[in-house]
Image (spheres, rainbow, N blue to C red):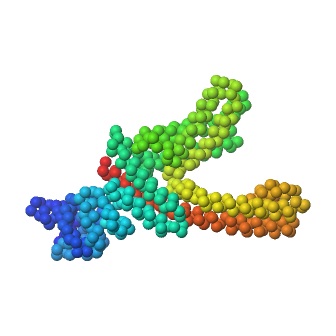
Amino acid sequence: MHMTGQALGNPGGRAHTDDNAAIRINVGGFKRRLQSDTLSRFPETRLARLLHCQSKESILELCDDYDDTEKEFYFDRNPALFPYVLNFYNTGRLHVMAELCIFSFSQEIEYWGINEFFIDSCCSSAYHCRKMDQDREDWDDRSDEGSTTSSFDELLEFYSDATKFDKQPLGSARRRVWLMLDNPGYSVASRIISILSILVVLGSIVTMCMNSMSEFSLVDGEGLPAEDPRFETVEHFGIGWFTLELVARFVVAPDLLHFFEHPLNVIDLVSILPFYLTLLINLVVESSPALANLGRVAQVLRLMRIFRILKLARHSTGLRSLGATLRNSYKEVGLLLLYLAVGVSFFSVMAYTVEKEDSEDFSTIPACWWWATVSMTTVGYGDVVPVSIAGKLTASACILAGILVVVLPITLIFNKFSLFYKRQKQLECNNVLFCVTMYRAV
């Protein structure tokens, strides 16, 4: 074999430009000569990877056949779609004609190693809408319209936000910081920030839990509970970090007016708001003793620090998928609550009827609601139990009915969670590829 990776990738001198600076492509009979410098602009694509092949075996891993004599690469693909690939190498953008089959086009660009985010803005909306319509038909038996569109909507929103920086002051620098803060796959610094944020959240929660233990309780000179200085230091560091994160994200956000429409940004705000409200209330109480009752409000706000655990959703695919599932499963959740309400009402009356004379715990129907709820959800505290044979048979029927009532809607919710989790992983992969591309471009 006379051709090496160096011969493919290096144009060489001017006398050998035709041989070394171009490669011959045959796609299902559609033949073209492509310049290596044009292909190398997109190093992750299949044709660009051919430039670095050092042996015939490595070449045949990327194409279907290779003619050593003619130095021609053969691909057994649809020749009608290859002009779109050629146009991409020439312009850097993909265009989709209305008459094309969306899934054939999607499979074709995936084969050539071209990502969907290169589709030009004039075709992007129509392309994704057509693809989502087909997805809805495929997932009809497991998901409603909201569950099939959310991931694509987020993906389009992400790409749209990234392009908004082009028309803003310091757009390139702000986009770099925005990608670094919101996408752990963007760079090493992004991963470090993500890990540090997780550690601060966990440290804050652990500190709050330890502060409630008697072993770490302190009292001041007046015998009132006091904050441990060590825990207070950790708390102030955590608040400082959370505040810095939120302010930094707000400053570099592509759309400031809609910044707090994103649920994760609302969670960031809620995680620090109790601290500053508590600080404000304490200042008011000190200046106005008549408002001493506000101190109880401050104590309640301190307990709201537990909401910081929700900040882990920014770094966890599972938590985001769970939130999306609950947001789009209100019908299934409502169905579950309806089944439980019917079962609790029925079995509480049954238990009252057969146990009211034998047990004081079943003296009223509302008192039986607690027993029926605990039994149907299979929790079984054992604090209230029937004593008669008829009551035990009723309890057995209640438990069996509870298993069926809980399992049936849960299956629907689980299917929807599986769908959201899969789409969230796809969304993250596309975002990482986009971030890598942006990082190289910058």
In screen coordinates, is 168 left or right of 417? left
Task: Find the residue positioned furthest to the top.
Answer: 287
Q: Where is residue 303 in the image (x, y as percent from the top left)?
A: 64, 42
- The quarter of the picture where residue 100 lies is bottom left
Q: State the residue at coordinates (90%, 61%).
A: 357
Residue 93 versus residue 179 in the image, above or below: below
Residue 319 versus residue 217 in the image, above or below: below
Task: Find the residue positioned furthest to the right.
Answer: 357
Q: How many labels does the image show?
A: 0
Task: Find the residue positioned furthest to the left.
Answer: 15
Residue 1 versus residue 358 in the image, above or below: below
> Who is closer to the viewer here, 160 or 387?
160
Q: State the residue at coordinates (34%, 50%).
A: 439
In screen coordinates, is 229 left or right of 255? right
> Who is closer to the viewer here, 207 or 177?
177
Q: Where is residue 391 in the image (x, y as percent from the top left)?
A: 84, 66
Q: Where is residue 153 in the image (x, y as percent from the top left)?
A: 45, 55
